[in-house]
Image: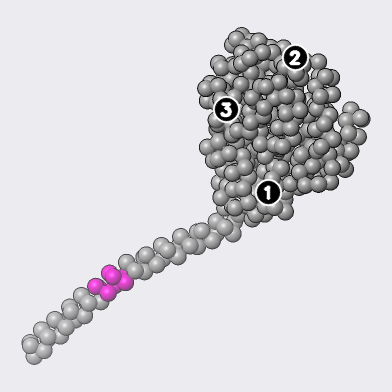
Amino acid sequence: MKKKILATVILTCMAFTALSGCSSNGGTASSASSSSQATASSSQQEQASGDVKYEIRVGHVLANTHPYEMGLQKFGELAAEKSGGKISVDVFANSQLGNERDMVEALQLGSQEMVLVSTAVLSGFTDSFLVFDLPFLFDTTEQARSVCDSEIGMEILTSLDDQGIKGLAWFENGFRNVTNSKLPITVPSDLEGIKIRTMESQIHMETFRVMGADPTPMGMGDVFTALQQGTIDAQENPLPVIDTNKFYEIQEYLSMTNHFYAPAPLFIATEYFNNMDEDCQQAVLEASKEAAAYERQCLDDMNAELEVSLAENGMTINHIDPEPFKEAVQPVYEEFIGTEAGQVNPDIYEKVQELLAES
Protein backbone atom coordinates (compact mmCIF):
# COMPACT_ATOMS: atom_id res chain seq x y z
CA MET A 1 0.00 0.00 0.00
CA LYS A 2 2.80 2.34 1.02
CA LYS A 3 4.59 1.55 -2.25
CA LYS A 4 1.49 2.43 -4.21
CA ILE A 5 1.13 5.72 -2.33
CA LEU A 6 4.84 6.56 -2.87
CA ALA A 7 4.57 5.76 -6.54
CA THR A 8 1.52 7.93 -6.82
CA VAL A 9 3.29 10.84 -5.08
CA ILE A 10 6.35 10.49 -7.33
CA LEU A 11 4.22 10.41 -10.48
CA THR A 12 2.26 13.43 -9.29
CA CYS A 13 5.48 15.38 -8.62
CA MET A 14 6.89 14.41 -12.02
CA ALA A 15 3.69 15.51 -13.71
CA PHE A 16 3.72 18.79 -11.79
CA THR A 17 7.37 19.38 -12.70
CA ALA A 18 6.67 18.62 -16.35
CA LEU A 19 3.67 20.86 -16.33
CA SER A 20 5.66 23.59 -14.60
CA GLY A 21 8.41 23.26 -17.19
CA CYS A 22 5.92 23.54 -20.07
CA SER A 23 4.22 26.36 -18.31
CA SER A 24 7.55 28.18 -17.93
CA ASN A 25 8.61 27.71 -21.54
CA GLY A 26 5.13 28.29 -22.80
CA GLY A 27 4.93 31.42 -20.66
CA THR A 28 8.08 32.82 -22.31
CA ALA A 29 6.78 32.11 -25.79
CA SER A 30 3.41 33.46 -24.86
CA SER A 31 5.02 36.55 -23.35
CA ALA A 32 7.12 37.15 -26.49
CA SER A 33 4.11 36.57 -28.67
CA SER A 34 2.02 38.93 -26.57
CA SER A 35 4.78 41.53 -26.65
CA SER A 36 5.08 41.22 -30.44
CA GLN A 37 1.34 41.45 -30.84
CA ALA A 38 1.24 44.45 -28.51
CA THR A 39 3.96 46.17 -30.51
CA ALA A 40 2.18 45.44 -33.78
CA SER A 41 -1.09 46.55 -32.26
CA SER A 42 0.55 49.73 -30.96
CA SER A 43 2.06 50.39 -34.40
CA GLN A 44 -1.30 49.82 -36.05
CA GLN A 45 -2.96 52.13 -33.53
CA GLU A 46 -0.29 54.73 -34.20
CA GLN A 47 -1.00 54.51 -37.93
CA ALA A 48 -4.74 54.45 -37.38
CA SER A 49 -4.68 57.42 -35.01
CA GLY A 50 -2.72 59.50 -37.52
CA ASP A 51 0.41 59.73 -35.37
CA VAL A 52 2.72 58.61 -38.17
CA LYS A 53 5.93 60.66 -38.27
CA TYR A 54 7.38 62.32 -41.36
CA GLU A 55 11.13 62.95 -41.35
CA ILE A 56 11.98 65.36 -44.16
CA ARG A 57 15.47 66.07 -45.47
CA VAL A 58 15.81 69.29 -47.43
CA GLY A 59 19.06 70.30 -49.13
CA HIS A 60 20.55 73.43 -50.68
CA VAL A 61 23.98 74.39 -52.00
CA LEU A 62 24.60 77.65 -50.14
CA ALA A 63 26.19 78.39 -46.76
CA ASN A 64 24.33 77.75 -43.53
CA THR A 65 24.44 81.50 -42.83
CA HIS A 66 22.53 82.37 -46.02
CA PRO A 67 18.82 83.34 -45.92
CA TYR A 68 18.10 80.01 -47.63
CA GLU A 69 19.06 78.31 -44.38
CA MET A 70 17.09 80.75 -42.25
CA GLY A 71 13.99 80.21 -44.35
CA LEU A 72 14.28 76.43 -44.31
CA GLN A 73 14.83 76.36 -40.56
CA LYS A 74 11.70 78.49 -40.21
CA PHE A 75 9.87 76.04 -42.49
CA GLY A 76 10.89 73.21 -40.16
CA GLU A 77 9.60 75.06 -37.10
CA LEU A 78 6.31 75.93 -38.75
CA ALA A 79 5.75 72.46 -40.20
CA ALA A 80 6.36 70.84 -36.81
CA GLU A 81 4.01 73.28 -35.11
CA LYS A 82 1.24 73.03 -37.70
CA SER A 83 1.40 69.21 -37.79
CA GLY A 84 1.38 68.77 -34.02
CA GLY A 85 4.90 67.36 -34.11
CA LYS A 86 4.26 64.81 -36.85
CA ILE A 87 6.73 66.51 -39.22
CA SER A 88 10.43 66.99 -38.49
CA VAL A 89 12.78 68.71 -40.93
CA ASP A 90 16.56 68.35 -41.24
CA VAL A 91 18.28 71.03 -43.32
CA PHE A 92 21.50 70.20 -45.20
CA ALA A 93 23.50 73.19 -46.47
CA ASN A 94 26.72 73.52 -48.50
CA SER A 95 25.85 70.82 -51.08
CA GLN A 96 25.96 68.10 -48.41
CA LEU A 97 23.33 66.13 -50.30
CA GLY A 98 24.86 66.86 -53.71
CA ASN A 99 24.69 69.60 -56.32
CA GLU A 100 21.36 71.08 -57.36
CA ARG A 101 20.78 68.75 -60.28
CA ASP A 102 21.62 65.72 -58.14
CA MET A 103 19.10 66.76 -55.51
CA VAL A 104 16.31 67.46 -57.99
CA GLU A 105 16.85 64.02 -59.50
CA ALA A 106 16.88 62.52 -55.99
CA LEU A 107 13.33 63.78 -55.51
CA GLN A 108 12.28 61.88 -58.62
CA LEU A 109 14.06 58.75 -57.38
CA GLY A 110 12.51 59.01 -53.92
CA SER A 111 15.88 59.17 -52.16
CA GLN A 112 15.36 62.74 -50.90
CA GLU A 113 12.21 64.53 -49.77
CA MET A 114 12.76 68.24 -50.43
CA VAL A 115 15.17 70.67 -52.11
CA LEU A 116 15.63 74.42 -52.54
CA VAL A 117 17.29 75.30 -55.84
CA SER A 118 17.95 78.00 -58.40
CA THR A 119 15.84 78.02 -61.57
CA ALA A 120 18.77 77.73 -63.97
CA VAL A 121 19.36 74.07 -63.13
CA LEU A 122 15.75 73.20 -64.05
CA SER A 123 16.22 73.68 -67.78
CA GLY A 124 16.98 69.96 -68.06
CA PHE A 125 13.50 69.16 -66.73
CA THR A 126 11.26 71.81 -68.32
CA ASP A 127 11.48 75.05 -70.29
CA SER A 128 8.89 76.77 -68.11
CA PHE A 129 11.43 78.29 -65.71
CA LEU A 130 13.66 79.67 -68.49
CA VAL A 131 11.94 83.06 -68.50
CA PHE A 132 13.74 83.85 -65.21
CA ASP A 133 17.10 83.30 -66.92
CA LEU A 134 16.62 86.24 -69.30
CA PRO A 135 19.06 89.07 -68.52
CA PHE A 136 17.84 92.43 -67.19
CA LEU A 137 14.23 91.19 -67.26
CA PHE A 138 13.35 92.97 -64.00
CA ASP A 139 14.34 96.41 -62.77
CA THR A 140 13.29 95.95 -59.14
CA THR A 141 12.77 93.22 -56.57
CA GLU A 142 9.12 94.25 -56.27
CA GLN A 143 8.58 93.59 -59.98
CA ALA A 144 10.22 90.17 -59.77
CA ARG A 145 8.22 89.11 -56.72
CA SER A 146 4.96 90.23 -58.27
CA VAL A 147 5.62 87.90 -61.21
CA CYS A 148 6.58 84.97 -58.97
CA ASP A 149 3.43 85.42 -56.89
CA SER A 150 1.14 85.87 -59.89
CA GLU A 151 -0.99 83.24 -61.60
CA ILE A 152 1.68 82.66 -64.27
CA GLY A 153 4.30 82.41 -61.53
CA MET A 154 2.30 79.69 -59.79
CA GLU A 155 1.82 77.85 -63.09
CA ILE A 156 5.58 77.84 -63.59
CA LEU A 157 6.24 76.74 -60.01
CA THR A 158 3.95 73.71 -60.32
CA SER A 159 4.96 72.74 -63.87
CA LEU A 160 7.01 69.76 -62.65
CA ASP A 161 4.31 68.06 -60.57
CA ASP A 162 3.83 65.32 -63.16
CA GLN A 163 7.58 64.63 -63.19
CA GLY A 164 7.66 63.69 -59.51
CA ILE A 165 8.60 67.20 -58.33
CA LYS A 166 5.94 69.31 -56.60
CA GLY A 167 6.44 73.07 -56.33
CA LEU A 168 5.61 74.55 -52.93
CA ALA A 169 6.76 78.18 -52.77
CA TRP A 170 9.06 80.80 -54.24
CA PHE A 171 12.02 81.55 -52.00
CA GLU A 172 14.58 84.01 -53.36
CA ASN A 173 18.30 84.48 -53.90
CA GLY A 174 17.97 87.98 -55.38
CA PHE A 175 19.72 89.95 -58.09
CA ARG A 176 23.09 88.69 -59.27
CA ASN A 177 26.17 90.93 -59.48
CA VAL A 178 29.67 90.51 -60.88
CA THR A 179 32.84 90.28 -58.81
CA ASN A 180 36.30 89.99 -60.33
CA SER A 181 39.97 90.50 -59.62
CA LYS A 182 40.87 92.72 -62.59
CA LEU A 183 38.79 95.92 -62.93
CA PRO A 184 35.41 97.55 -62.20
CA ILE A 185 32.74 96.53 -64.71
CA THR A 186 31.13 99.78 -65.84
CA VAL A 187 30.21 99.02 -69.48
CA PRO A 188 29.75 95.69 -71.32
CA SER A 189 33.14 95.92 -73.01
CA ASP A 190 34.84 95.74 -69.60
CA LEU A 191 33.91 92.05 -69.60
CA GLU A 192 36.01 91.39 -72.71
CA GLY A 193 38.25 88.38 -72.07
CA ILE A 194 37.12 87.90 -68.46
CA LYS A 195 36.84 84.23 -67.56
CA ILE A 196 33.70 84.14 -65.40
CA ARG A 197 32.00 81.33 -63.55
CA THR A 198 28.32 81.03 -64.43
CA MET A 199 25.55 78.63 -63.62
CA GLU A 200 24.88 75.71 -65.95
CA SER A 201 22.44 77.67 -68.12
CA GLN A 202 22.74 78.24 -71.84
CA ILE A 203 21.03 81.63 -71.50
CA HIS A 204 23.36 82.71 -68.69
CA MET A 205 26.40 81.63 -70.62
CA GLU A 206 25.31 83.30 -73.85
CA THR A 207 24.54 86.52 -71.99
CA PHE A 208 28.15 86.86 -70.92
CA ARG A 209 29.45 85.57 -74.23
CA VAL A 210 27.73 88.34 -76.22
CA MET A 211 29.37 90.87 -73.88
CA GLY A 212 32.79 89.43 -74.63
CA ALA A 213 33.38 87.33 -71.52
CA ASP A 214 34.44 83.68 -71.37
CA PRO A 215 31.69 81.91 -69.37
CA THR A 216 32.59 78.75 -67.47
CA PRO A 217 29.87 76.71 -65.71
CA MET A 218 31.00 75.32 -62.38
CA GLY A 219 29.50 73.83 -59.23
CA MET A 220 29.15 76.27 -56.36
CA GLY A 221 31.40 74.25 -54.10
CA ASP A 222 34.38 74.72 -56.46
CA VAL A 223 34.13 78.46 -57.06
CA PHE A 224 36.20 79.83 -54.16
CA THR A 225 39.19 77.59 -54.93
CA ALA A 226 38.97 78.34 -58.67
CA LEU A 227 39.02 82.08 -57.97
CA GLN A 228 41.82 81.71 -55.46
CA GLN A 229 43.97 79.72 -57.88
CA GLY A 230 43.22 82.01 -60.82
CA THR A 231 41.47 79.31 -62.83
CA ILE A 232 38.71 81.88 -63.32
CA ASP A 233 38.80 85.67 -62.95
CA ALA A 234 35.24 86.39 -61.92
CA GLN A 235 31.94 85.06 -60.67
CA GLU A 236 28.39 86.43 -60.45
CA ASN A 237 26.02 86.02 -57.53
CA PRO A 238 23.67 87.92 -55.22
CA LEU A 239 25.23 89.88 -52.35
CA PRO A 240 24.42 87.33 -49.61
CA VAL A 241 26.24 84.61 -51.55
CA ILE A 242 29.23 86.89 -52.10
CA ASP A 243 29.30 87.62 -48.39
CA THR A 244 28.62 84.17 -46.94
CA ASN A 245 31.20 82.59 -49.26
CA LYS A 246 33.75 85.28 -48.36
CA PHE A 247 34.55 86.12 -51.96
CA TYR A 248 35.71 89.50 -50.69
CA GLU A 249 38.87 87.76 -49.49
CA ILE A 250 39.94 86.98 -53.08
CA GLN A 251 37.94 89.40 -55.29
CA GLU A 252 38.70 93.13 -55.30
CA TYR A 253 35.87 94.50 -57.45
CA LEU A 254 32.11 94.24 -56.99
CA SER A 255 29.99 95.68 -59.79
CA MET A 256 26.28 96.07 -59.02
CA THR A 257 25.04 94.87 -62.38
CA ASN A 258 21.77 93.22 -61.24
CA HIS A 259 21.85 91.33 -64.52
CA PHE A 260 19.78 88.26 -63.50
CA TYR A 261 17.09 87.91 -60.86
CA ALA A 262 17.33 84.59 -59.07
CA PRO A 263 14.15 83.17 -57.56
CA ALA A 264 14.47 79.87 -55.70
CA PRO A 265 11.68 77.29 -55.94
CA LEU A 266 11.13 75.01 -52.96
CA PHE A 267 10.22 71.48 -54.08
CA ILE A 268 8.99 68.31 -52.42
CA ALA A 269 8.88 64.83 -53.97
CA THR A 270 5.37 64.48 -55.39
CA GLU A 271 4.93 60.85 -54.32
CA TYR A 272 6.15 61.61 -50.80
CA PHE A 273 3.72 64.51 -50.51
CA ASN A 274 0.82 62.49 -51.90
CA ASN A 275 1.42 59.76 -49.30
CA MET A 276 1.26 62.19 -46.38
CA ASP A 277 -1.83 62.57 -44.19
CA GLU A 278 -4.06 65.39 -45.40
CA ASP A 279 -3.43 67.45 -42.28
CA CYS A 280 0.32 67.13 -42.79
CA GLN A 281 -0.02 68.05 -46.47
CA GLN A 282 -1.81 71.21 -45.40
CA ALA A 283 0.87 71.90 -42.80
CA VAL A 284 3.58 71.64 -45.47
CA LEU A 285 1.71 73.94 -47.86
CA GLU A 286 1.06 76.60 -45.21
CA ALA A 287 4.53 76.38 -43.68
CA SER A 288 6.25 76.71 -47.06
CA LYS A 289 4.36 79.91 -47.93
CA GLU A 290 5.02 81.50 -44.53
CA ALA A 291 8.68 80.45 -44.58
CA ALA A 292 9.12 81.95 -48.07
CA ALA A 293 7.88 85.33 -46.84
CA TYR A 294 10.23 85.07 -43.86
CA GLU A 295 13.19 84.17 -46.09
CA ARG A 296 12.53 87.15 -48.37
CA GLN A 297 12.52 89.47 -45.36
CA CYS A 298 15.81 87.99 -44.16
CA LEU A 299 17.23 88.65 -47.62
CA ASP A 300 15.99 92.26 -47.62
CA ASP A 301 17.51 92.86 -44.20
CA MET A 302 20.84 91.39 -45.26
CA ASN A 303 20.97 93.28 -48.58
CA ALA A 304 20.36 96.57 -46.76
CA GLU A 305 23.63 96.13 -44.88
CA LEU A 306 25.88 94.22 -47.27
CA GLU A 307 27.10 96.98 -49.58
CA VAL A 308 28.54 98.76 -46.55
CA SER A 309 30.03 95.65 -44.97
CA LEU A 310 31.53 94.35 -48.23
CA ALA A 311 33.16 97.74 -48.78
CA GLU A 312 34.50 97.59 -45.22
CA ASN A 313 35.92 94.18 -46.09
CA GLY A 314 37.95 95.77 -48.87
CA MET A 315 35.82 95.51 -52.01
CA THR A 316 35.65 98.40 -54.49
CA ILE A 317 31.97 98.77 -55.38
CA ASN A 318 30.43 100.51 -58.38
CA HIS A 319 26.91 100.84 -59.80
CA ILE A 320 26.23 100.64 -63.53
CA ASP A 321 23.96 102.36 -66.01
CA PRO A 322 21.89 99.33 -67.11
CA GLU A 323 20.88 100.68 -70.54
CA PRO A 324 24.12 99.83 -72.43
CA PHE A 325 23.97 96.34 -70.93
CA LYS A 326 20.33 95.84 -71.92
CA GLU A 327 21.21 96.86 -75.47
CA ALA A 328 24.21 94.54 -75.54
CA VAL A 329 22.18 91.46 -74.55
CA GLN A 330 19.34 91.88 -77.06
CA PRO A 331 20.75 89.05 -79.21
CA VAL A 332 20.04 86.73 -76.26
CA TYR A 333 16.34 87.58 -76.41
CA GLU A 334 16.29 87.05 -80.16
CA GLU A 335 17.95 83.65 -79.82
CA PHE A 336 16.19 82.27 -76.78
CA ILE A 337 12.55 83.31 -77.13
CA GLY A 338 10.78 80.80 -79.35
CA THR A 339 8.93 77.52 -79.57
CA GLU A 340 11.90 75.17 -79.79
CA ALA A 341 13.26 73.08 -76.90
CA GLY A 342 15.55 75.15 -74.71
CA GLN A 343 13.78 78.41 -75.56
CA VAL A 344 11.55 80.67 -73.47
CA ASN A 345 7.91 80.07 -74.36
CA PRO A 346 6.62 83.23 -76.10
CA ASP A 347 3.28 82.98 -74.27
CA ILE A 348 5.00 82.92 -70.88
CA TYR A 349 7.26 85.81 -71.87
CA GLU A 350 4.26 87.84 -73.08
CA LYS A 351 2.34 87.26 -69.83
CA VAL A 352 5.37 88.36 -67.82
CA GLN A 353 5.74 91.47 -69.94
CA GLU A 354 2.05 92.30 -69.41
CA LEU A 355 2.50 92.06 -65.65
CA LEU A 356 5.59 94.26 -65.79
CA ALA A 357 3.72 96.86 -67.83
CA GLU A 358 1.13 97.04 -65.05
CA SER A 359 3.69 97.47 -62.28
Residue name at image x 14 percent, y 81 percent = 10
Pick the front one: 1 or 337: 337
Residue 223 is labelled as 3
* SS for callout 2: loop
Find disc 1 in the rendering and name its residue.
165
Residue 290: give x, y in percent of width and height.
Answer: 71, 35
Residue name at image x 24 percent, y 73 percent = 21
Q: Residue furthest left?
A: 2
Residue 210: give x, y in percent of width and height.
Answer: 76, 28
Tell me the kind of residue under disc 1.
Answer: Ile
Q: CA distance from mark 2 to mark 1?
A: 40 Å
Pick the front one: 297 or 16: 297
Q: CA distance from mark 3 to mark 1?
A: 28 Å
Is the residue marked by circle 1 packed among few (<14), some (14-19), or many (20+) residues within 10 Å? many
Find disc 2 in the rendering and name its residue.
186
Residue name at image x 65 percent, y 54 percent = 271
Residue 135: give x, y in percent of width and height.
Answer: 78, 29
* SS for callout 3: helix
Residue 238, quarter of the rendered image: top right
The magenta span reads 20-27
Say which quadrant the N terminus sits in: bottom left
Residue 347: give x, y in percent of width and height.
Answer: 88, 43
* First of labels 2, 1 by sequence position: 1
